[in-house]
Amino acid sequence: MEKLLVISLLLLISTSVTTSQSVTDPIAFLRCLDRQPTDPTSPNSAVAYIPTNSSFTTVLRSRIPNLRFDKPTTPKPISVVAAATWTHIQAAVGCARELSLQVRIRSGGHDFEGLSYTSTVPFFVLDMFGFKTVDVNLTERTAWVDSGATLGELYYRISEKSNVLGFPAGLSTTLGVGGHFSGGGYGNLMRKYGLSVDNVVGSGIVDSNGNIFTDRVSMGEDRFWAIRGGGAASYGVVLGYKIQLVPVPEKVTVFKVGKTVGEGAVDLIMKWQSFAHSTDRNLFVRLTLTLVNGTKPGENTVLATFIGMYLGRSDKLLTVMNRDFPELKLKKTDCTEMRWIDSVLFWDDYPVGTPTSVLLNPLVAKKLFMKRKSDYVKRLISRTDLGLILKKLVEVEKVKMNWNPYGGRMGEIPSSRTPFPHRAGNLFNIEYIIDWSEAGDNVEKKYLALANEFYRFMTPYVSSNPREAFLNYRDLDIGSSVKSTYQEGKIYGAKYFKENFERLVDIKTTIDAENFWKNEQSIPVRR
Ligand SMILES: Cc1cc2nc3c(=O)[nH]c(=O)nc-3n(C[C@H](O)[C@H](O)[C@H](O)COP(=O)(O)OP(=O)(O)OC[C@H]3O[C@@H](n4cnc5c(N)ncnc54)[C@H](O)[C@@H]3O)c2cc1C
């Protein structure tokens, strides 16, 4: 009987391979995993959750922060493989090939379009959260960080060893290193040190045949270039990155000052546009635009909040601010000096005094429905146009904006050094934020429509031909691939990568000609 089962299974598999039909039976997937080379102390199938396991849903949902993709109707994987060893990854890749399944690689799960855990074709999730080693080498001032570690874990482990070293990466501490670095990775050290990928010096990756390349030399310079901002999911499973740590002072200074339109926000935003990208590169001042109650009942107005960090003490910061942005009238009492590691908590909105051990919690506290869009601004927005933008913000109500200044180191790095092309000439990046908590298709439709309306409205003020976008703020509205053709890919690829898109396609064509690694916005093969 058992023999018969094996024969019929083999027949089923060989049929599926020859016809390229996916095998969607979870049990067949488990059996496949166990047919692959295995480590007897940790069998492959033991780390694979399938829908009949009681913990399947918990494991799947624990790293879905975006409620837009956490609905009963969201397509589910046939399995979540919580890989803990390289052998598990190799087995999962082997079964993706054998059973014609798509692999969705997930590190932190923060992809804004859910591409790391949803798909419209049969798939499984390769979860990397078990890979979270952070190994800091103080002599070299480097660290190895596994893909499944969060930024919070990375920052915490660095600070355990040194209070004068840090790393330039994102502001939200539950982001996964795997996805964050593969899209570039920016944070408040960007004007001084560039992006995360500008400070990556090595990596390891598993390819579509299960080959493991443990360093930059063995994977080759092209592949190493592509996975630093080109979306690593088009090229393989990144095991981790070797990073160069950067010096930070013993004390940094942070501040947050908000002014409404009635309190002079328009003048301040006008000045911010020319100040923020050109000031001292030790200073990063993000501008956020949100709605608050106006002075009259039922009326809304825009609040401009300037959130800053200076790599140094407050007296020096005040000298810089009085020289470059006196209009903000920043006072000593607005400033708080703290260790760099405490500033990480400040930027992630933790109350002052929160213990840094909270950084070791990898899961988001509050899930929301989320949509993001992005833009790049290369010319100052005039006062008249700014007035129109603020009026539109009040009209659409639901959209918030973060304006993140570039300049400094960002302007010095050639745009072809990594796939991330948005370098010199950019004043700031805009992140459009649309978050909501009410469930329902109609609500979702309404908010997504408002997001698109506002994005269309911004067209004259932002980059064009192409209208550039930031990969980490993934947005399927700017183009997505159904047939994985070059033509489809070029539509979103030119926006995310500009001229670098062609090199990404060439590398893809050389190392993954069969297009094994694909998703709705992957790099296509040139045919
Ligand atoms: C609240 C919030 C704040 C944010 N703040 C910032 C910020 O300050 N700066 C910034 O730059 N971005 C920011 N982002 C965007 C964030 O960097 C991206 O969403 C990033 O992709 C998240 O990485 P992840 O590992 O958590 O996501 P995942 O969803 O796990 O992965 C994202 C993509 O990378 C792929 N991937 C993941 N791991 C691997 C791997 N090991 N090998 C190959 N491919 C892999 C996935 O398949 C997917 O395509 C923010 C996002 C959120 C939700």
Image (cartoon, helix red, strand yellow):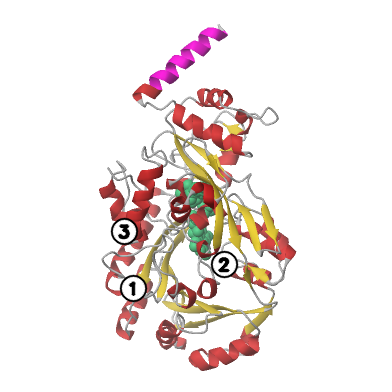
Disc 1 packing (10 Å; few <14; some 14–19; many ≥20): some
Q: Position of residue 488 (x, y in %)?
A: 28, 49
Q: Against 213, is 430 above or below?
A: below
Q: Are marks 3 and 1 in contact (CB under 8 Å)?
A: no
Range covered by the magenta-colored residues: 2-16
Instruction: Report the residue marked by disc 1.
Output: 392
Instruction: Report the residue marked by disc 2.
Output: 168
Q: Where is residue 144 in the image (x, y as percent from the top left)?
A: 63, 55
Name which residue type carries label 2.
Pro
Instruction: Report the residue marked by disc 3.
Output: 494
Q: Position of residue 441 (x, y in %)?
A: 39, 48
Count every numbered label the image shows and give the total: 3
Q: Against 377, is 322 above or below?
A: below
Residue 158 placement: quadrant:
bottom right
Mark 3 against mark 1, which lies toward the viewer? 3
Mark 2 against mark 1, which lies toward the viewer? 2
Q: In this view, does 443 lie to the left or right of 141?
A: left
Q: Is residue 234 left or right of residue 249?
A: left
Name which residue type carries label 3.
Ala
Placement of the N terminus among the 4 image quadrants: top right
